[in-house]
């Protein structure tokens, strides 16, 4: 717990000042987390189309149960129609979210290695976009799946959003730390 708190404190600054206590931890932990997340993305992309659709459909049913009043009173056909209707948006949101997380992890890795400011943002975005392109290429070889340029664009936008969220959180944390 102590180590995690220290690591969080070291990530507050966007000015890339070297934190001697935890720079080694950040330099190991963040790239490992980024690589693990890339493996998760690869695993989702390796799922054949029916399996991938079933995952999205199941999530759609769960969203219905949580977000729609009286969903359980609906007929099975109505519930299925709802899940099918929101399956596509769920898939696209999943794409964007996967890459937002990847963008955050790659951006954090860049900062841990002293790549700062706009250079870190560009580095993280280019890396996540490149990975999105390779992921779509990989899907060309998965039964029932296809590689789509629009998905690369969506993934790239998700990465940009994740990176910008991380930057904003970092700036807020900097302001709070300065006030103390």
Image (cartoon, helix red, strand yellow):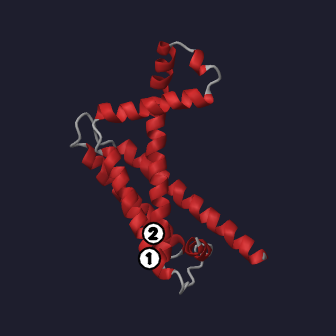
Image coordinates for residue 10, horizontal then vertical, percent: 59, 77
The quarter of the picture where residue 2 lies is: bottom right
Image point 27% across, 44% down: which residue? 139
Give the label on residue 30, or none: 2
Residue farthest to the right? 179
Residue farthest to the bottom? 20
Looking at the rendered image, the quarter that the C terminus falls into is bottom right
Q: Is residue 99 above or below residue 144?
A: below
The total number of labels drawn is 2
Image point 38% across, 48% down: which residue? 152
Q: CA distance from mark 1 to mark 2?
A: 6 Å
Query: Can I make out residue 109 in this image?
Result: yes
| Left or right position of 165 against 104 | right
Task: Kindly indicate whether the residue at mark 2 contacts the one at mark 1 (C-beta within 8 angstroms).
Answer: yes
| Left or right position of 46 against 166 | left
Image point 74% across, 71% down: which residue? 176
Image point 30% across, 34% down: which residue? 49
Name the residue beneath numbered marker 1.
27
Looking at the rendered image, the quarter that the N terminus falls into is bottom right
């Amino acid at each position: 717990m102590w180590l995690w708190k220290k690591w969080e404190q070291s990530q507050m600054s966007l000015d890339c000042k070297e934190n001697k206590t935890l720079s080694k931890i950040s330099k190991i932990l963040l790239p490992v987390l980024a690589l693990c997340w890339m493996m998760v993305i690869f695993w989702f992309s390796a799922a054949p189309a029916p399996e991938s659709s079933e995952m999205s459909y199941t999530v759609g049913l769960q969203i219905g149960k949580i977000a729609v009043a009286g969903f359980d009173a609906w007929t099975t056909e109505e519930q299925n129609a709802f899940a099918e209707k929101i399956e596509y948006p769920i898939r696209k949101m999943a794409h964007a979210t996967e890459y937002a997380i990847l963008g955050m992890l790659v951006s954090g890795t860049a900062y841990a290695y002293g790549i700062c400011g706009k250079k870190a943002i560009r580095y993280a975005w280019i890396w996540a976009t490149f990975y999105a392109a390779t992921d779509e290429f990989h899907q060309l070889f998965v039964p029932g799946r296809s590689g789509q340029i629009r998905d690369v664009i969506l993934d790239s936008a998700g990465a940009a959003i994740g990176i910008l969220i991380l930057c904003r959180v970092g700036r807020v944390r900097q302001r709070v730390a300065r006030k103390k």
